[in-house]
Image (cartoon, helix red, strand yellow):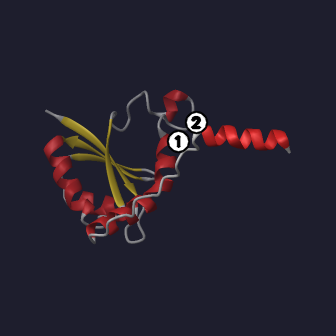
């Protein structure tokens, strides 16, 4: 069986992790579900997990972000009980990513509306000859 674990990171004003957990349990799918501080972890057969999470994402397309996770819930490497406490590996990365999600959501909404972002004006580099002139002017002063 081809198993897969995905992390559902929720940064939504419409949906709570508990809403997603309830929806997942109501599906009666053969998956392992774990609620976390950032959302939900879902583990099971690849096709089942992908189908379920496609439906979950529809609850708030701009507030629910899904990424594949390397290890299933309960793996010894990730478990704080066997690691004697502390943050799980990857926790700080997810915490940092979570702070950017509102910006990503806004960009996705704008993209779906057909808005084209303005190109940022790049500053031209200072010409070497002009830089030499500035140095000479400051030496004279």
For the point 48% across and 53% down, which residue is it? Answer: 122
Q: Closest to the observer: 8 or 24?
A: 8
Q: Is residue 20 left or right of residue 129?
A: left
Question: Residue 108's x, y, as percent?
Answer: 33, 62
In the picture, the quarter occupied by the N terminus is: top left
Circle 1: element type: helix
Q: Closest to the observer: 43 or 137?
A: 137
Question: Residue 44's x, y, as percent?
Answer: 22, 42
Q: Which mark is residue 92?
A: 1
The reply to whether residue 46 is in sight is yes
Q: Which mark is residue 86?
A: 2
In the picture, the quarter occupied by the C terminus is: top right
The reply to whether residue 37 is in sight is no
Tag 2: Cα neighbours inside 10 Å, few (<14), some, or many (≥20)? few
For the point 45% across and 58% down, which residue is it? Answer: 120
Place residue 19 in its image quadrant: bottom left
Q: Is residue 75 left or right of residue 4?
A: right
For the point 51% across and 48% down, which residue is it? Answer: 96
Q: Closest to the observer: 2 or 30?
A: 2
Circle 2: element type: loop
For the point 67% across and 37% down, which residue is it? Answer: 132
Tag 1: Cα neighbours inside 10 Å, few (<14), some, or many (≥20)? few
Going from N to C along the chain, the mark reached first, 2 or 1, is 2
Question: Residue 124's x, y, as percent?
Answer: 52, 49
């Amino acid at each position: 069986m081809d198993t897969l674990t995905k992390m559902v990171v929720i940064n939504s004003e419409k949906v709570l992790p508990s809403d997603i957990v309830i929806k997942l349990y109501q599906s009666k799918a053969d998956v392992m579900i774990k609620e976390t501080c950032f959302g939900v972890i879902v583990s099971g057969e690849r096709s089942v997990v992908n189908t379920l999470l496609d439906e979950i994402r529809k609850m708030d397309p701009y507030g629910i972000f899904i990424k594949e996770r390397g290890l299933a819930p309960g793996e010894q490497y990730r478990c704080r009980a066997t690691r004697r406490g502390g943050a799980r590996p990857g926790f700080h990365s997810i915490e940092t990513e979570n702070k950017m999600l509102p910006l990503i959501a806004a960009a996705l909404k704008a993209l779906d509306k057909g808005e084209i972002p303005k190109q940022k004006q790049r500053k031209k580099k200072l010409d070497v000859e002009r830089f030499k002139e500035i140095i000479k002017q400051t030496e004279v002063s």
